[in-house]
Image: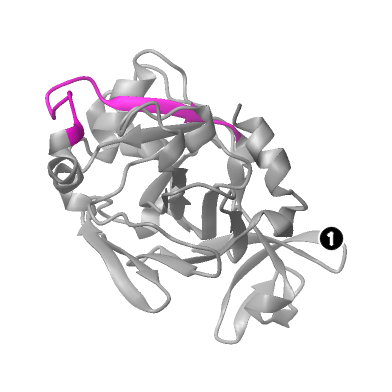
Amino acid sequence: MKTARVAFAGALHEAQPHDAGLRLADGRVLRENEVVWLPPFEPGTIVALGLNYADHVKELSKELTIGEKDEPLVFLKTPGSTIGHRGAVRRPAGVRFLHYECELAVVIGATAHRVKRADALRHVAGYTVCNDYAVRDYLENWYRPNLRAKNRDGGTVLGPWLVDAADVPDPQALALRTIVNGVVVQSGTTANMIRDVAWLIEYLSAFMTLQAGDVILTGTPEGVTNVNVGDEVVCEIDGIGRLSSTIVGDEAYGIGEQHECASNT
């Protein structure tokens, strides 16, 4: 089953897919552009993986001082960084490189503490698509994410649907791609993850308790490129969904160039 959370007519609604767009829990059928899409679940702690695809590590090999055998590159994000399907993502004035990252997002459904790999997937409620944007200029270097690069307000797009774990028999057999303005610019498969979903749950739950609503962003394959104001960016994962967002400038957020420059000093 696929479910979404949307805002319509001053209220929050649960929705399911419909041939015409989506069907609210009360039976009303609406087009996608008639609602405001929210993340399809209420996010808790967001645990994000960097460099978890072998081809992406190879792509950045000249810039890295870590390899596949080192500890995973893991960082945390707050719920305030998330927005939903069809959202507007701000590209700050003056930045040189804003890139997308199409990722499989794993939503925890039951408390996981010191879980063994063989039992790990039993703690998964479902899966959704994530586009985890990053301002490359704000990285401490090319591979160490910091707060401004990876925890910006509205920079983590989730949705449209939360797909029940029971409907995804193998999370390591999913094709994913990114499409910018109608052109495929990134493609890969979750089979190319260095650490698979079950491994990550075992690893993380060994030192932190994962709660229902927590989400693991599992990394992105090779093929990240710069995107600009006006670009439409679509991330697709077969069987999970098609997640769209649009890049906007500071003026859409009521921010002037002088304010942004002051924040960078």
- Name the residue that disc number 1 marks: 11
The residue sitting at 30% across, 32% down in the picture is: 143
Instruction: Determine the main secondary structure of the stretch shown in magenta.
Output: loop
Quarter of the rendering containing residue 17: bottom right
Residue 264 visible to the viewer = yes
Give x and y (percent) for residue 39.
60, 52
The magenta stretch spans residue 72: yes
Instruction: Return the residue nearer the eye: 222 or 142.
Output: 142
Instruction: Return the residue nearer the eye: 221 or 2.
Output: 221
Query: Magenta segment, which residues?
Result: 63-78
Give x and y (percent) for residue 209.
46, 19
Residue sticking out furthest to the bottom: 20
Q: Is residue 166 left or right of residue 87?
A: left
The magenta stretch spans residue 229: no
The residue sitting at 41% across, 18% down in the picture is: 113
Vertical comparison of 88 with 156: above or below: below
